[in-house]
Amino acid sequence: MFDIGFFELILVFIVGLVVLGPQRLPMAIRTVMGWVQTIRGMAANVQNELNQELKLQELQESIKKAEHLNLKALSPELAQTVEDLKVSADKMKADLEQQAASTDKSVQEYIKDVRETNAQNASLDNTASTTDKIVENPTALSPAELAEQAEMDEKLAHIIDAYHPAEDVPPPEKKD
């Protein structure tokens, strides 16, 4: 790969031994080998994906050429092969579109969940800030405001209980 001979490898090993020492050299070698394996794996994945795309593109080009050359003049076996190629190209295209749609759907669901969570957090923040304002000035509250504060406290308690169950409740026992 790098055209490194045996003597160059020994020289690199000796320099590494002198620089890193005998205790850290094995760890450094493992780390470098891990990087090399990761890079090789990534290169192989990219190469496989490019090969698949090139095959698909070649199939589509050959189908277009065959259509231009008048399929009726071709032999029946060759016409059948061209039809098989069309079917396989359409199937590959449909599979790719289906994967893209499922990925898009899962991303949309995740975005929706995040928005709902943000909305719930905002409503909790608003409730908490309203409660804090009420608690800061409790002497200036009318009876109606006191009732409203009690309702808000009760709603907040239900929301908090939903997220944080009571600690004194024993966990459910497992049945054997």
Image (cartoon, rainbow, N blue to C red):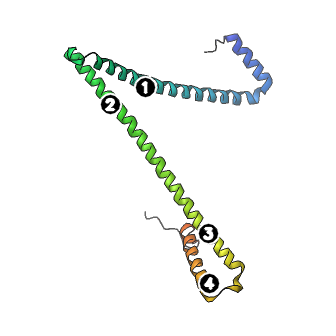
The tag earlier along the polypeptide, 2 or 1, is 1
Compare residues 99 and 30 and report the one nearer the observer.
99
Q: Residues within 10 Å of mark 1 (few under 14, many from 20)?
A: few
In the image, taking residue 109 as reference, residue 39 lies left or right, namely right
**Amino acid identity at mark 2:** Asp
Q: Residues within 10 Å of mark 2 (few under 14, many from 20)?
A: some
- Quadrant where the C terminus lies? bottom left
Mark 3 residue element: helix
Marks 1 and 4 close (CB-CB < 8 Å): no
Q: Which residue ends up furthest to the right in the rendered image?
A: 18
Vertical order, 136 against 62 (above or below): below
Q: Which residue is mark 3?
A: 126
Mark-to-mark CA distance, 2 and 1: 14 Å
Residue 145 coordinates in the image, percent (x, y):
62, 84
Q: Which residue is mark 2?
A: 90
- As drawn, the label of residue 52 is 1
**Amino acid identity at mark 3:** Asn
Marks 4 and 2 close (CB-CB < 8 Å): no
Vertical order, 61 against 146 (above or below): above
- As drawn, the label of residue 175 is none
- As drawn, the label of residue 145 is 4
